[in-house]
Image (cartoon, rainbow, N blue to C red):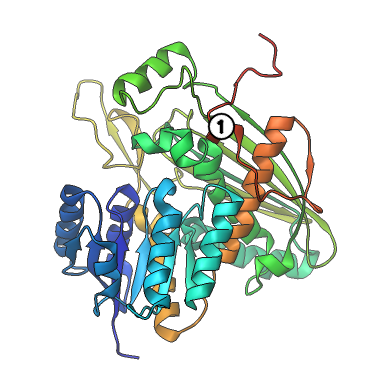
Amino acid sequence: MTDNLGIGIVGSGFIANFHAQSWTGVRGGDIVAIQSRNDATARALAERCRALGVGEPTVTDDLAELVRDPRVDAVWVTTPNHVRVETIERICEEVSAGRAELRGIAVEKPLARTLAEAKRVVAAIEGAGLEAGYLENQVFAPGLGRAKEIVWARGASLAGAPYLARSAEEHSGPHRAWFWNAQLQGGGVLSDMMCHSIEASRYLLTPPGQDAGTWLTPLSVSASIAGLKWTRERYADELAATYPGEVDYHRHPAEDYARATVEFRNGDGDLVIAEATTSWSYVGAGLRLSFELLGPEYSAQVNTLDTPARIFLSRALQGEQGEDLVEKQNSEQGLMPLLEDEAMTYGYTGENRHMVAAFRAGHRPRETVYDGLVVTELMMAAYLSAESRRTVDLKDLDLDDYVPQVAQGTWDPLAGRGR
C-alpha cells in the first residue's frame, strides 16, 4: 500500500496540538488541512505541523471547504463538546449528499455530552456510511498495552480472567474556559475525564483481540461527585477572575472530583468490576494517569509519573512557568518527573498510527463510536447515581432524555450532605 492518507483536522485547540505532536510517529498519512473558527490558533497549528514535518496544511474557517478538499481523505474532529454534534452532522451531510468523499472520520473523546447527542453522532456516521474511530488515547498507551498483553498471556491464561480494574486520571484543572463551563462541556470532571478511565478499565478487563462490547455486559453503576477545591470561595473567585463572564462557580459549579464503580458480567459469566476516579483537584507534579489490573494470582500497575527521567531545580532558581516537563505542570522547582515523549506515553501516537492504518486499509478501527456510545451511557448512569445517591441498575434503564443536573446548571454540591 503506497497511498498516503490526507488528514483534515477540525479544531485548533489544545488537543489538536497534541495530535500534531504525535504525528511524528505516524506513517501513511499527512496533515493537509485545518479548519477552525479561530484563525490565529489555526495558523499557529499549521505552522507547528510544518515545523514538525508532518504536513503542509492549508487553513480555512469553512468546514464544508475542508471536507470537500480532494486532498482530505479522513477527518479528525477535535472541536469543543458543545459544537461536536453539529460539526459531525455537517460533515456527514456533505458525504451523504455526494459533495465530499471521505475514507474515515475520527472523533475525539467524549463522543458527546449526553446519550441523546451520542446517538445522533452514531446515526449521522452510519447514514453517511463512514468508517469511524473513537479517539480514546489511553487504550493505545504503550505501557498500558504491554501490561495488558503480559497479564493476559502469563496470568489469565493460567489462573483465569482478571476481575478488577482501577483507572484514575488526575490533574489541577483544564486549560480553557469552556471546559470549566458545565453547560458547554456537559458537566465537570466526570464528563471531561471519566470517559478515559471507564474505557481504560473496559480495555484491561477484555481479552486481547476481543471486542469489549461483546465480552463485557454492564450491570450497574454506583457513583459520587463532589466539589472539593474549586467550589471553595477562594478558588471560585480565582476562576471568575481568570475567565470573567464565562465561568461562575459561585452560582453554577461543576464537580472537580468523581468516582464510579461499574459492575460487568464478562464472557466467562463472572462478575468483574471497574473502579474509575477522576479529579481536577489533584496537586502534584502534573497530570497523573494510573491503572491497576487484578486477577486470581496476578496484578499489574502503570503510573505515568513513574518516569525514567527526573530533574532537580533548587529554590534559588525562579524560572518562568511552563509545561515543558509534564502536562498540567504545577511546579518549576524541586525534584520533578520528566516525560520524554508525552504524546507517545499517553497513547496519542499509537491511536493515530492505528486510525491511519485502519482507514487506509478500509477496516473498522479497534476503538469505534460504538465504544464511545457505551462509555457515554455509563457516564450518564454515573451522574444519575450521584444525583440520586443510589446504585443504578442498568437493565431496562432509559437515559435518552437525561441531562445531568451539573450540565443544567442546577447542581448543589451540598445537597443531601447537610449544611
Q: Residue furthest right?
A: 269
Identified at 47% across, 54% down, the residue is: 109
Looking at the image, residue 384 sits to the left or right of residue 137; the answer is: right
Q: Position of residue 387 (x, y in %)?
A: 69, 31
Question: Is residue 276 depicted above or below 24 in this figure?
Answer: above
Q: Nearer the viewer, residue 27 or 121?
A: 121
Instruction: Specify the quadrant of the image occupied by residue 99.
Output: bottom left
Q: Quadrant of residue 8?
A: bottom left
Residue displayed at 41% across by 22% down: 248
Does 216 sit left or right of 107 as displayed?
right
Residue that extends furthest to the top in the rendered view of this protein = 419
Residue 107 in the image: x percent, y percent?
A: 44, 61
Mark 1 neighbour density, 10 Å: few (under 14) some (14–19) many (20 or more): many
Apparent side of residue 62 relative to residue 264 in the rendered image (left or right): left
Q: Give the labeled residue for mark 1.
A: 406
Q: Quadrant of residue 147?
A: bottom right
Q: Compare residues 185 and 94 and report the one nearer the observer.
A: 94
x and y, in percent, of residue 106 in the image = 43, 66
> Relative to the observer, which residue lies in front, 291 or 353?
353
Q: Is residue 365 visible?
A: no
Residue 378 to residue 386: above or below: below
Image-based side of 360 in relation to 149, left or right: left
Q: Amino acid at mark 1?
A: Val
Location of residue 160 with respect to 388 vertically, above or below = below
In terms of secondary structure, where does tag 1 sit?
A: helix
Image: 331 above or below 5? above
Q: Quadrant of the C terminus?
A: top right
List x then y, in percent, for residue 70.
25, 80
Residue at the image point whose x is 60% and y is 59% from the top = 373
Q: Residue at x 53, y 35 (%)?
A: 407
Camera-side residue of 6 and 114? 114
